[in-house]
Every structure is written in C-alpha cells, then in structure tokens.
Amino acid sequence: MNILSVASEAFPLVKTGGLADVVGALPGALAAEGVRVRTLLPGYPAVLGALGAADEVWSFADLAGAPARLLAGTAGGLDILALDAPHLFARPGTPYAAPDGADWPDNAQRFAALARVGADIAGGMLADWRPAVAHAHDWQAALLAAYLHYAGTPVPSVLTVHNLAFQGQFPATLLAELGLPPHAYALDGVEYYGSIGFLKAGLLFADRITTVSPSYAAEIRSPEFGMGLQGLLRGRAADVRGILNGIDTAIWNPARDALLAAPFAAPSGRAANRAALQARLGLAPDLAAPLFAVVSRLTWQKGMDLLPAALPALLDEGGQLAVLGTGDAPIVAALQAAVAAHPGRIGCIIGYDEGLAHLMQGGADALLVPSRFEPCGLTQLCALRYGAVPVVARVGGLADTVIDASPMALAAGVATGVQFAPVSVEMLEAAIRRAAALHRAPDAWARMQTNGMATDVSWRDPARHYAALYRELAG
C-alpha cells in the first residue's frame, strides 16, 4: 500500500521539534506492515542538500508566483518528494521564522503551496505513483484535506494533530490567492473566526483525525485543551483516534549510543554518564545527590515558568539540576540567575545539542516534564529507554506513558515514574520531593529504572495502528 505523507519537517533532514521525529521515524516502522511511504517536504536548503542528485518528476510554470519543481530521491532513509520552490523555501532561519524570530510573512502561501501539491499528487499528478491515502501533519499540511474536498478528489485523507495550539490562521483576503473557491469561506469551510484556518479546515475535511496519544484525543474535546476547536472536534468524535507516538529505538539505544560517555544495558551501567554530565554542566561530583534534568523548550506550555519557583524544594532535598533548552527570555533569565546563585548545584545550557540531550538521558537520575498540556511528548519516552525516571504532569501522552509510583504500583513492582496534578508550583515541588525520597530507596529506584528500560517505546505498535487505519480508509 502506498501512502503520501506531507509535512513541514522530518528528522534527520530538518527538525524544530517532535513533529520531525515522528515524520522521520514512522515510514521505517510502517515498512514492516507492508506500507510504503513517500514523504513530501518543502525544498529547504538542508533537504535539497541531503537529496543530492535527484530526479525532476514535475515542473510548475507558476507556483505561488514563480516556477518550481518536484524532485524525487532518497535521503536520511526516507523516500522523499521535495518541493523545490526557491522563492518559498530557499531562505535562512527556521522553516517558519526569519533569523530575527519573526514569522515569515508569506507562511500562508508557502504551506498552502505544499498542501496543494500534496493534493495534486494524491489526485494522480504522477503517472507512475499514486497513494491510497494522503496523510497530512499539523497545520502546515492540513489544507491538503480542503484541496482534496474542493477538487472532488476521491482519495481519503488523515490529519495528525501534533499540537492543537498551533493552528495556522491567515487573512481572509488570501482566499483566491491560495486557490480556494469563494464558497470555501464559510463556517462549513475554511473560515475560522474571520480568518482562514488551515488546521480548522483539515479537522473539518480529513476523513480521519489522529492525535499522538489517546489522552490528548480526549482532552482536545474539552474547553480546557480544545483551543477553540473543541466543538468541531466533539462533532467529529467518531473520527478521532489517539495513536501514541514511539521513538526510533535504533537512534535511542543506550547499549549502542556513541553519544554517551559509556553505553550501558542496565541501570547499574549509568554511573560514568552521570559523572560526565555533572562535569559538562559544572555540577559538583556528588555521588548521593539526586540529579534532575530538563531537556525541553523553556516555555509556558512546558510548565518551565514553574521551575524557578520549585528550585528551593529541589535544593532542599540535596538535588542537582541540569537544564538544556531554549525558549522564553524571562524563563531563561530566571534559570541563569539560579545558576549564578547556586554554582555546582544548577547547570544550564541555552540552546540545543543532540549529543548532550543523549548524555542527559543517560546520566540524569530523573527527568522533569511539568507540561501544562502535552500531546504526546518524546523526551519522557527517551528517559524510560535510558533509565532516567520521568517526573511528569498527568496530562496527554505523559499520563499515557508513565506509570506513577503510587503505593499500589510500587507494591506490584510496575511503577516507572512520578506523576502529578494539577500543574502548579506546589504539586511540582511535591513531585520532586517524592522522587527524591524514592531515590533514597535504592531498591525501589532501581526497579523503576529497570521497568522503564523494559518498556516498549518503539514504533512497532503505533505502526500497526496506523497501518490498520490506512487499510480501513482504503477499503
């Protein structure tokens, strides 16, 4: 079965977050289910550079104002279709923003072009290849479902929501420029609070909607987590599925990870990585201190504004903290001030370093993930795989993937981490104190680490669910 996947990023070619990890890892897992995926990506310089020599399979005399080409090739283990449109994608910065951090002013045109070409491919533009299902990821590709609908193309579509908070809203005056018919601007079309809603359109027109965890699929139908779209999602409840993400267990394999100071296959082998992490972050080589880590965007969504206020509890328990991430300036400033106030106890690196992220998972005792909402989360899956005990908010995919160390779970020997709710400073402090107390009980702690490392966090089971969904739609 052929599937077209349309996304704005894919690891290892281009990545800003977990979306790229999913888009990059899922095709390989689906191959075991007899599903062949071709991934349509924007022709960013990094994508075209990774493709190298590629075949031109289509040309556009005018795509959003200038000529463009569709290239086919392989890169990063993926079967790639790259939309080579230099006027849209050959620019510095991130896929979505200029070097100064401001969104590109033509993001509507850029990602509408991606979605429209995806719809054309689904409709048979390529004579030698046609997908049974088109799979769009997040708002950047969501308009694909609308283009299929208005063209009357009888190809089923799936929209995966990786984060409902990012919706892609643009001025209604762009309707014609984006190639949408006048009657599309309506409540039962692409109109959304006086604008064109890319994600809203995808949620309305996709044949099936998936989220990246079962709990998030339920949460987004509530006012608290629905981001204004809960009514639409409640109306489509029968078509919404929650399929938990996995991680690439070949890349995230502690027994063979060259990015670690010392690969390991059991919790007892983590000591060298702990020492290396302490040295890298300027932390005292304290063997007894519970070493907490954060590998995250430093934002309100991730609950990182609560962390500075909870530091006294962490320090009071004799703990250390290692932080890797980038994000909101006030949070960054507060953490840097904490480093200055507590040298040897708190270390912080602002930015992202893939190698350090692996070392933190392999060396930290516990990973803090206090998100206010979390569609799935991948960092806690990596933590489980590497024997770092996750301390997580009881939301979304965090609730689905971590078994709380309640008295009953500890007695049954099944706990893998610590959950807390609601998301507040007080409850985060309580969770940190619980984790520190467990760390002082070596047998219980080692059992949680062993349980986590034995948890199947691979794409094997999610791939089976996606393959079943594709077959259901393709009949």
Image: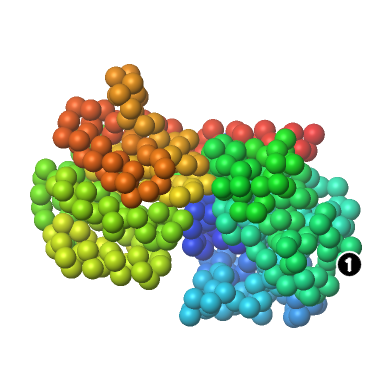
Which quarter of the picture shows residue 180? bottom right
Q: Residue 43: give x, y in percent of width and height.
A: 62, 69
Q: Residue at x 57, y 70 (%)?
A: 96
- 208 or 302: which is nearer to us? 302
Q: Residue 83: give x, y in percent of width and height.
A: 67, 67
Q: Which residue is mark 1?
A: 182
Which quarter of the picture shows residue 88? bottom right
Q: Residue at x 63, y 60 (%)?
A: 167
Q: Secondary structure at mark 1?
A: helix
Task: Please indicate whether residue 24 sits to the left or right of residue 181 in the image.
Answer: left
Determine if residue 161 is in view.
yes
* Residue 138 position (above or below residue 178): above
* Residue 253 position (above or below residue 412): below
Determine if residue 86 is in view.
no
Q: Residue at x 37, y 37 (%)?
A: 419
Q: Residue 29: give x, y in percent of width and height.
A: 55, 40
In what quadrant of the picture does the C terminus appear? top right
Q: Residue at x 42, y 54 (%)?
A: 302
- 2 or 457: which is nearer to us? 457
Task: Please indicate whether residue 449 sits to the left or right of residue 96 in the image.
Answer: left
Circle 1: is it few (<14), some (14-19), or many (20+) Cα within 10 Å? few
- 271 or 397: which is nearer to us? 397
Total labels drawn: 1
Q: Residue 301: give x, y in percent of width and height.
A: 46, 56
Amino acid identity at mark 1: Pro
* Colour setup of the view: rainbow
In what quadrant of the picture does the N terminus appear? top right
Task: Please indicate whether residue 228 sits to the left or right of residue 9 in the image.
Answer: right
As drawn, which residue projects farthest toward the front? Answer: 426
